[in-house]
Image (cartoon, rainbow, N blue to C red):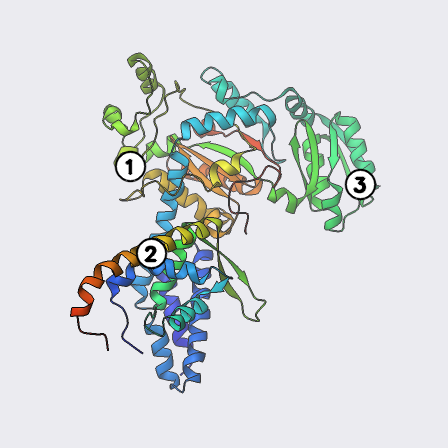
Amino acid sequence: MSDGFQRDLLRGSLDLMVLSVLADEPQYGYSIQKQIRDVSQGRVDLKAGTLYPLLHRLEADKLIRSKWDDSTGRRRKWYELTKAGQKRLHAQAQEWHSYVECIGQLLTLVLPTLPKPA
Amino acid sequence: MSKSEFDQYLALLSGLLRLSPTQREAIASELRDHLEERLEELLAQGVSRQKAIETALEEFGDANGLAGEFVQIFQRQRRRWMMRMTFGTAAAISAIVLMTSAFWPEGRPGLSPPKLVAQSEANQATTRVPLFSPRLGDADLQAEANLRKRIDVDCIDTPFADALDELEHQSELQFYVKVRYLEDIGISTNEPVTLSLTDVSVDMALQLMLENLDLTYVIRDGIVLVTTAEDFESIAEVRVYNCRDLLEAYVGYDVDESESDSDPSLDHGTDASPAEKKNNRNGKKKKSEDKSSRVEPHRHQSSPKEVFVQFGGGGGGFVGGGGGGGGIGVAQGPMTEEEQLMNIISIAVMPESWEEMGGPGTIGEFDGMIVIRQNPRAHRQVEQVLHMLRDASGQQNWQNAESRRGFMGQGGLGSGGGGFF
């Protein structure tokens, strides 16, 4: 397991991560956090203290919506994407792809001279 | 160690959340669920209980910072509503008023005193702009009059339907019973009714009769709709509360009108002549929107001092609709008086019924007038809160702030936003 990413690098993309985790099905806070941690192999450990304000902000922005449900045997607040959230996810995902591509292009010039990651 | 440390943390956090009790509780129970699940996971990994509790709590960070973040989101959201309301409101209101007033009649909940409406009508008759103040339809005026008729009622174990027939006959009103809703709560039109009164208003007789059955009524298009209390609550009704007196009474309220031309962004291409602008000044008090950075269109219709707005129908799309919020910059700085007033209302009146708590109610503000879409019961409470505020602040002329209202049927007209809840 490698080190986590720098905070600065993460800051702009946490929203996108949460939105993409919610793309398929409704989730609750804990499961969102766990999924991000699992998929990133532990490199992105979204702290609970960051996650919940983020969720509430996304909800205030109407990108996600929530409802309480206890059908899993536990009363939980489930989040899912709204239409606007799906749109935002698509737009941001595309933006990220082209951003990554762009950075990748730039780095091919310098990467060979840089030390390889461990 | 027990989980009481979770309780302590959440209690601390809740205390720091300057939100309504319902909101605080919602946040606390969401975080509790997380803490407990995290605790289980850590225990399963073989971490000691004490350590697991500490870790779970650490991941949330200090309660103060976290509470601050939640409150900030809440306030930002509130400003967002304001933006939605104020952005292009002048145009929106006139369009909606025009549209809906054409289709939707005046309605009123059973308990509101007709006297007030009449009185304020007299007060305002000279200053109203016709566009904004559709008069009561003939049908509604007739219904209002008929409801004030005094009659004798003598029902002893009379089937509900027959009792209504009798009232209908005496009052010359038309009744319509929403039977399906009655069936939902197990009430049939054969329910025995006992009510024996002399020289009672139709309004009162009807209320008494219905109350016993957990029913109530509203008037629409001159027809008395009898329905369940529950259905009644789901009826969204838009009302405009003129709160300029309260806002002006606010200490430090800025009534200086000289800055009204200072912000070019506020000029919505109105070609109002200087004379018309002067009219505006005479007609209304300058609001304090320039204190915050909100972009708010000035009203450029010539404005009477009190504007009565009545609309229904599209209200959902107007207030709660998703449109318009996103692109607009979020206002910064301290809450304005209007925001504070709206805040007080939404905390004091059925806190869980507002949009931010997943309820259907919306609140917005336009030029010192608070526009609220809520069920009639909530409106009654809003009225009380405003009344008390006026009493407390020594405002004498609260009668002037009587609101007019329009009805919209629940759901029927496609409310704009938040159908999820």
Quarter that holds the C terminus of chain A: bottom left
Whether residue B341 sits left or right of residue B372 in the image: it is: left
The residue depicted at 29 percent of the width and 60 percent of the height is A11
The span from disc 1 to disc 2 (Cα, nearest Å) is 50 Å
Q: Looking at this view, is B182 or B402 the one in front?
A: B182
Quarter that holds the N terminus of chain A: bottom left
Dividing the picture into quadrants, the one containing residue B375 is: top right
Q: Nearer the viewer, mark 1 or mark 2?
A: 2
Q: Looking at this view, is B214 or A93 the one in front?
A: A93
Residue that carries the numbered disc 1 in the rendered image: B251
State which tag comes first along the sequence, 1 or 3. Answer: 3
Circle 3: is it few (<14), some (14-19), or many (20+) Cα within 10 Å? many
Q: Amino acid at mark 3?
A: Phe
Q: Chain of mark 1?
A: B
Q: Position of residue B352 (x, y in %)?
A: 50, 52
Q: Amino acid at mark 2?
A: Trp
Residue that carries the numbered disc 3 in the rendered image: B160
